[in-house]
Amino acid sequence: MPERLPFSRPVPSRRPCLTAVLRMAGLRPTRQRVALAELLYGGPHRHVSAEELHAESLGAKVNVSLATVYNTLHQFQQAGLLREVAIDASRSYFDTDTSDHHHFYLEDEQRVVDIPANSIAITGLPDAPRGMEITHVDVVVRVKRLR
Ligand SMILES: [Zn+2]
């Protein structure tokens, strides 16, 4: 067990780092973008819907509209900072882990859980249409509790 320090050192803010990440992704680090990035990247990797992030932002006294949250999530996604996991036409989650992997969708809980990329083997894919290449394959495996 590591010994506890007799005093607590201030935790360095992630804000300068996130500002740099946004700049490198080609996004101007506005106050709202940095605040939403802090909520998104402040902990371990996760999957979040726009509605959930909007509720979190209000709880954290970050005053943004749901439309701004939507726009920002899509800007982050287009800049490669997030991956969109589309469940159906009206439901999307945004994944802070942009590496190749797949997902379980827990229908009862409306929650997305990771499946490691190497635990699914995909064979028999058709050729991409002429002049195109396959960039990646997203698998969403829908599950529900046994009754
Ligand atoms: Zn994921």
Image (cartoon, rainbow, N blue to C red):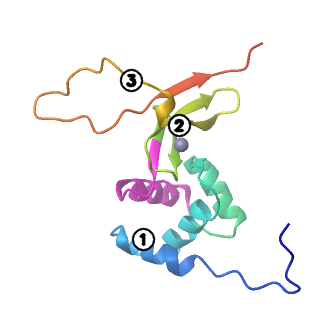
Determine whether 133 is above or below 75 in the image.
above
Residue 99: image x %, image y %? 44, 48
Q: Give the class, few, some or many, for how many residues have Cα within 10 Å of label 2's Cα (few <14, many ≥20).
A: few
* Structural distance between the alpha carbons of marks 3 and 1: 34 Å
Residue linked to disc 2: 116
Residue 90: image x %, image y %? 50, 34
Q: Secondary structure at mark 2?
A: strand
| Mark 2 C-beta to ligand 1 under 8 Å | no
> What amino acid type should be assigned to the residue bearing mark 2?
Pro
Would you say 6 lies left or right of 121 here? right
Residue 76: image x %, image y %? 42, 59
Q: Which residues are magenta?
A: 65-84
Q: Secondary structure at mark 3?
A: loop
Name the residue nearer the viewer: 111 or 64.
111
Determine whether 17 is above or below 90 in the image.
below
Residue linked to disc 3: 122
Determine whether label 2 and label 3 are within 8 Å by CB: no
Q: Give the class, few, some or many, for how many residues have Cα within 10 Å of label 1's Cα (few <14, many ≥20).
A: many
* Structural distance between the alpha carbons of marks 1 and 2: 27 Å
> What amino acid type should be assigned to the residue bearing mark 3?
Ile
> Which is nearer the N-term, disc 1 or disc 2?
1
> Which is nearer the N-term, disc 2 or disc 3?
2
Q: Quadrant of the N terminus?
A: bottom right
Name the residue nearer the viewer: 23 or 67.
23
Q: Nearer the viewer, mark 3 or mark 1?
A: 3
Residue linked to disc 1: 22
